[in-house]
Image (spheres, helix red, strand yellow):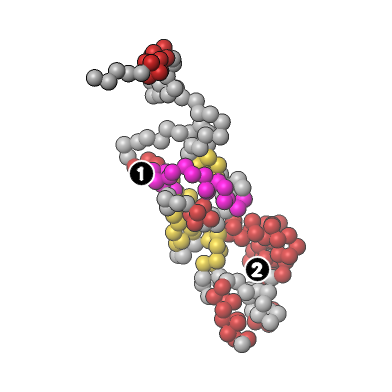
Amino acid sequence: MKYPKIREIKEAVISLVSPAYTTSYPKKPHKPYKDYRGKPVVDNENCVGCETCANVCPPLAITFEDDREKGIRIIRRDYGKCIFCGQCQEHCITGKGVKLSDQIYDMASYDRNDNVEYQEKELLICKNCGAIITTKEHYIFMHKKLGPKAYASIMNLNILNEKLKLSAKEYSEVDIQDDLKRKDMFNVLCPNCLHEAQIKNF
């Protein structure tokens, strides 16, 4: 028979008189440490619905669907699939659209649908060919990032007027017309229109 070594006996005695390393949750409340990666919390005011988080999500917990008829993008977040990797927070283009909470960690439920959240964003659709460009909030965000460079097209001026509310939309909005374009460059609204313009000018 092989007897335990002195070192093993010592470790066993120490473990008997030492406090547990694990918490007593759920018997006692648990307070996570700072920067704990808990539930990703979405800030709708700073989320522009750009699809970036859906593109970088490893378990595909974030998906989206565009409803052309209603003109909305439906974003679905299934936290039952979330692995709390923080990729959505790291790659958020606004830097504020989603943050991993260091307090919300208990999401256990008997119904998986309890951990599914939906979000809707208004779509920007090309008036020329009907293609979906992006969400309106995403376009406005890019408009702000570009600064003065954004005023090169009628579409951008329409967005600016809507933001500043200088005039009613029906009086100020200008339709995209061939005679308003400069070599079909500045007023192209989407990749489909761009492709058509390139073929036309070839």
Three-letter code for the amino acid on which mark 2 is drawn: Met
The earlier-in-sequence mark between 2 and 1 is: 1
Q: Image height check: is 147 above or below 85?
A: below
Point out the residue furthest to the right here.
148
Q: Nearer the viewer, residue 152 or 24?
A: 24
Which residue does the numbered mark 2 point to in the structure image? 155
Q: Nearer the viewer, residue 178 or 82?
A: 82
* Residue 113 placement (x, y as % from top left): 35, 44
CA–CA distance between discs 2 and 1? 40 Å
Rendered-image quadrant of the C terminus? bottom right
Residue drawn at the location 34% of the way across and 42% of the way down: 112
* Residue 12 placement (x, y as % from top left): 37, 16
Q: Nearer the viewer, residue 23 or 184?
A: 23
Q: Is residue 63 among the parts visible in the rendering?
A: yes
Q: Nearer the viewer, residue 189 or 38?
A: 38
Neighbor class of circle 1 (other Cα within 10 Å; few <14, some 14-19, many 20+) is few
Q: Is residue 70 among the parts visible in the rendering?
A: no
